[in-house]
Image (cartoon, coloured by chain):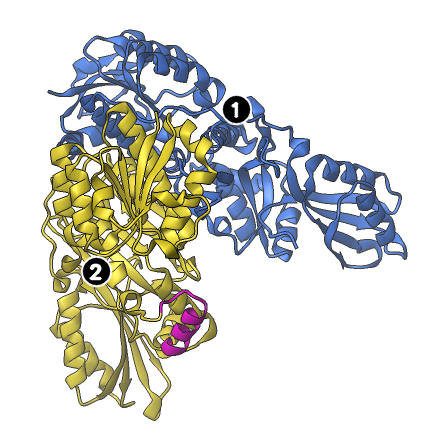
Chain colours: A yellow, B blue
Amino acid sequence: MALKVALLGCGVVGSEVVRQLARQADDLAARVGAPLELAGVAVRRPGRVRLPEVDPALFTTDAAALAVRDDVDIVVEVIGGIEPARTLLLDAVKAGKSVVTANKALLAEDGATLFAAAQATGADIYYEASVAGAIPLLRPLRESLAGDRVERVLGIVNGTTNYILDRMDAHGSGFSEALEQAQALGYAEADPTADIEGFDAAAKAAILAGLAFHTRVTAADVHREGITEVSAADIASAKAMGCVVKLLAICQRSPDGSSVGVRVHPAMLPREHPLAGVREAYNAVFVEAASAGRLMFYGAGAGGAPTASAVLGDLVAVARNRLAGARGPEETTYAGLPVHPMGDSVTRYHVALDVADRPGVLATVAESFARNDVSIKNVRQEGHGDDAQLVIVTHMAADAALAATVDDLRRLSTVRSVASVMRVEALADG
Amino acid sequence: MALKVALLGCGVVGSEVVRQLARQADDLAARVGAPLELAGVAVRRPGRVRLPEVDPALFTTDAAALAVRDDVDIVVEVIGGIEPARTLLLDAVKAGKSVVTANKALLAEDGATLFAAAQATGADIYYEASVAGAIPLLRPLRESLAGDRVERVLGIVNGTTNYILDRMDAHGSGFSEALEQAQALGYAEADPTADIEGFDAAAKAAILAGLAFHTRVTAADVHREGITEVSAADIASAKAMGCVVKLLAICQRSPDGSSVGVRVHPAMLPREHPLAGVREAYNAVFVEAASAGRLMFYGAGAGGAPTASAVLGDLVAVARNRLAGARGPEETTYAGLPVHPMGDSVTRYHVALDVADRPGVLATVAESFARNDVSIKNVRQEGHGDDAQLVIVTHMAADAALAATVDDLRRLSTVRSVASVMRVEALADG
């Protein structure tokens, strides 16, 4: 007896799901224990979609009806965005359908509503495709590490920004030039805001933090800075320190474990860090756990086929569960840890200052750090005379203290300008 | 109502499992939905084990009785080896206990018997800890990629040999010296045979291949070569080509997909390959799938705490299943692909020949390759006169044809000696 699948949305990912369902029908049936059969495909304009694998009679514009149709067992949503996806999935879950979704925005904004509804009806909600495309993260975090304590998750979860920063690093180009190149190659959209301002990464950070810390985290809880301010000079400074600049999604427990911080911002990473070698549009997530130690998951973070691979893996899982009358692991939010503000996050700063090259400058600058309780890891002076620049890397401190230090520095008469400020992650503190 | 756990074996991993069960009791209970309670710990000499976390009354020398005791729900086996582990687990499964094991040797030799028994009673057998310690591989391969077609798995799955080869690469040391260093630091055992001869990696390769190809593969099916013959000169040759030498576990479909090859041997890998950057005793597994593309999983492959993390993740999973009256995904061997002999595996050779430096040598050598249908990708001559060496890298060819070519070369009068032969993996064929 076949399991019936309703597909909501048929863009790049949806079309690939349809193709793979047809191409791998026998394998999928063997793995599930029953054939998977397409019950319908909801699209906005049926005439536009050309897929020889689909009986044209299966196309419908009535997604709402399809999502709750009696003969449908599983609903796959690849429309994206908050509405109508939320209403469609909520109705599907209430009608007892198992759900597979790639919708990071919806889960990061209002996953709670969906999970509560699923809890009530015993429906499965699987969403591996919502974070880092084909890279298995959901199962590793929510199942493999279920017996461990995750301390920190550090991820490159947006391919567009990684491509841009990698290009800036490899070619010395500026941000705008690298963005144009990314757009020309299809790595960035015509309106790149969601990527370059960090919105996409912030949604994924919320989902990762929720899984890692058994706590509900929404996109609004995530401190977010994009990469538009990253300059060729910043990249050069990073290089001089043996670092690369990456847009990181960072989910971290506070030192005493009583709260968590979730943030997205560009940061310097030492070149020997496993994440530093993640080139082009690839994604990777680095996990530090109390017992497991350091783990990294690497792969294609976007694209039709990789995302479809994640969707189909979930489809097989929920189909197996359905046949067995079972459910996958539920969302666990038992820890309920508060999300602390960015100012309480503990990190390091790299600060480059254009200064007057005269005695006493370093003392004045050092005094600003000391006043804010920020300890300096190292200082070096580059150039001299009018070109003198002080480059300072701090030890770990609260972000608020670091930011206050920079404000202080801006007010010093001996500091001509603060040329660059960037956080530095993943260096062992010495 | 607590779930009762019987622990068989209490060495490095077992002790850590006990410690974590105590330390994380509340978290584990919240994640499972019920407390996990130690029902007994089977050891050979109870007096020897000092664990303040365990009520001394829980120790027993009667593993057989503990494994089937009525009040036990879950049996965790960390004894290792074939017997008595096989009999203990078989009896446990027949008695309907859920099983978590780290026993790669047993699964690679006789997993079939265990899985068949589990099928009959509906028991779970989870074994994440058996391959690459804390790195989640079981779930990614058997669940996340269940909707994809895995083409190839390339793994560094033995930390001891990776440490030795990394040391040879970084310090130019010979094999024996690097082995001694590894032993001094505790990365290699006093009798290092299982690691350096590739037995450990071969067992893991069998398990990975079974998961990747939905086919039963045993350790006996795996072509195995260790690293004892790898010389400082081989490492230097690899360096000259921009490569590193790694002991790889390779699971690969034949070009027409009708069979699979599973092999463990040292091989050259280009430095830009993600696996090439895996240093020291770390492990990593690189997966190529039709839709997902390239994925890599990286982390600690051994050690008490990392292995315990994998065991505890499985423990949470089987406990959840038990509470839900459900089962995890079964072993799938529906594809039943034959394992082809090593001679049919398609690979590339790097061959270094000490030759007489005179006209016609290259022609004679090239003729040997041509006669065996092996096409040459590039040749370079190093040195001249008595020191002349020809370094040849082939295109992809069947291993048997490559081996026959080397036999031919050894018989040529113009070839003084075949200085080095090593396979080259993961280069795009040009």
Judging depth in this view, the residue of B338 and A325 nearest the camera is: A325
Q: Chain of mark 2?
A: A
Q: Quadrant of the C terminus of chain B?
A: bottom right
Above or below, comparing residue B403 to residue B389 in the picture: above
Q: Residue at x 28, y 85 (%)?
A: A354
Judging depth in this view, the residue of A310 and B373 nearest the camera is: A310
Q: Residue at x 38, y 12 (%)?
A: B117
Q: Which residues are magenta?
A: A174-189
Q: Position of residue B257 (x, y in %)?
A: 58, 35
Q: Residue at x 39, y 33 (%)?
A: B142
Asked which secondary structure carries label 2, the reply is strand
Residue B32 seen by the camera: yes
Looking at the picture, which amino acid does disc 2 mark? Arg
Above or below, comparing residue A383 to residue B264 in the picture: below
Question: Image quarter for residue A105?
Answer: bottom left
Looking at the picture, which amino acid does disc 1 mark? Gly
Q: Quadrant of the N terminus of chain B?
A: top left
Residue neighbourhood size for the residue with mark 1, other residues' Cα within 10 Å, grouped as few (<14), some (14–19), many (≥20): some
Residue underneath mark 2 = A263
Residue underneath mark 1 = B336
Q: State yes or no: residue B53 in magenta.
A: no
Above or below, comparing residue A115 to residue B71 in the picture: below
Q: Chain of mark 1?
A: B
Q: Residue furthest bottom?
A: A386
Q: State yes or no: residue A184 in magenta.
A: yes
The kind of secondary structure the magenta stretch mainly shows is helix
